[in-house]
Image (cartoon, rainbow, N blue to C red):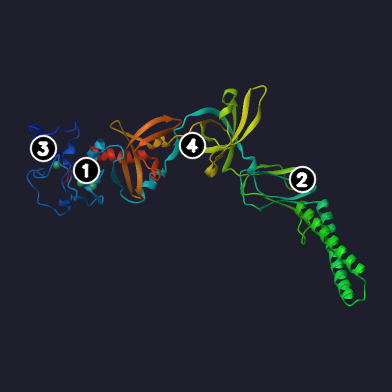
Amino acid sequence: MKTYTHTHLLLVALCTVALIALPGAPVQAAGDDHDDHAGHGHENEAKGAAPAADPHAGHGHDEEIDPTAFCKEHQLFEREDALCQAGLIAALQPGQGLKVRLASTEVAAKAGIKTAKPQSMSTAAGVMLTGRSEFNRNRLARLTAVGGGVVRRANGEVGQRVTKGELLAEIASPEGAAARGQHGSAVARLAQAEAAFAREKDLFGKGISSRLEFQQAEADLGAARSEAEQLRAQLAGYGVAESGGSQSRLRAPLAGVIVEKHVAVGDVVAPGTPLYTIADPESLWIALALPETRVGQAVVGASVEARFDGLPGSLFRGRIVSVGAALDERSRTLQAVAEIKNPGGKLKAGMFGQVKLLTAAAGESLVVPAAAVQSIDQGSYVFVRQAADLFEVRRVEVGAKEQGLVTILFGLAPHDEVVVAQGFALKSEVLKARLGASCADH
Ligand SMILES: [Zn+2]
Ligand SMILES: [Zn+2]
Ligand SMILES: [Zn+2]
């Protein structure tokens, strides 16, 4: 249905001339001959209808498209078929759309088309501040050598993900070995005390030994138990197992990413030497400095929205989690910290960004990356994924554009999967369909 024949071009021209000559006929869109194909049923093509002298005769130009007319090529009703009825696109109202059927389910992926749901951004008034991202210190762990010694193993590299409990380092530590010796002795003493207690209990029950002897055995057992427990805890602190090798084993205390590593195999480390820093990159802190005039707005729990020049089109949301007690004497600013979600760890620590501290509750609006909005005939459109090979070209009403994000005032829902990358590939399909006579072979 896409071959544009010379004969047909002439017929279209004739048809248009005839319409213009007709009194009271609606004005045709300039240079858009194919608008006048609206309303003819494509099922006729498939049925091989007998060629007429004027193929346009009898089908309703300028009338509503027959709601039952079905396009077999695109498996869509004609009235929703953007490729066969490309002329309808310009007439869409915000929120209305037409569908674009691709040649196969692989086309979109090959073209690099990516979709994402629109982000929600507050329309509330706010104070604009500069912020710096840093690791969330509640989700950060520094791993230090508890006992000194020689490093036998130092797993992982900076940037590598680790799971909670993953083995990172092994240190042959004399203190660790000594702790294990003490623990072993305590366990042996505990066994003796248990045996003595059982014996005294038996003798006391038979009236052979005194109550005093029984009570002494009971007290000895309690002391041996608490000593063994204390030394077991000390051993665990060194990361030394109760049996097997006596190396001190250091494990990741939380799941995250290794952000610092100061240790290599063969190093001799003293107790307290920092070895690793593990951080959770999916939750970051933003350090904020509020001018003195704005200290009233710094309230724990207040919402913030952060954007970073290095990550155009991304919005990070969070809340103030702590506010300083006093102004910094030199800068006359109040320090505050916001915690933000950073799914996928896109935002890195140490980046500067613009942070909006929201000061009043208000509505939410949806925003999409600027690349998601396509302009056709001065109208704004987005492509919304319906299926692997089916996209809707939808007219939207756009609002403010800043920091690579465009506010969609109307026409988008939070669950819509909007094309955010390579949407131009879809736009050019639509434009091609409009230039070429998609219905020329009828
Ligand atoms: Zn026609
Ligand atoms: Zn079609
Ligand atoms: Zn067609």
Check disc 4 and report the residue beneath it: 315
Q: Earlier in the sequence, mark 4 or mark 3?
A: 3
Q: Earlier in the sequence, mark 4 or mark 2?
A: 2
Residue 227 placement (x, y as % from top left): 83, 58
Check disc 1 and report the residue beneath it: 438
Please say if the residues under marks 4 and 2 sit with CB atoms less than 8 Å apart: no
Q: Earlier in the sequence, mark 3 or mark 2?
A: 3
| Residue depicted at x 39% and y 47% | 109
| Residue depicted at x 16% and y 51% | 45
Check disc 2 and report the residue beneath it: 267
Residue 58 placement (x, y as % from top left): 9, 45
| Residue 258 visible within the image | no
Report if the beta carbon of the residue with label 3 is closer than 8 angstroms to ligand 1. yes
Query: Which residue type does callout 1 highlight?
Result: Ser
**Can you tell which mark lies on residue 15?**
3
Q: Nearer the viewer, mark 4 or mark 3?
A: 4
Badge 1 element: loop
Please say if the residues under marks 1 and 4 sit with CB atoms less than 8 Å apart: no
In 3D space, how far apart are the residues under numbered discs 4 and 2 (Cα atoms)? 43 Å
How packed mark 1 is, by other alpha carbons closer than 10 Å (few <14, some 14-19, many 20 or more), is many
Query: Which residue type does callout 4 highlight?
Result: Leu
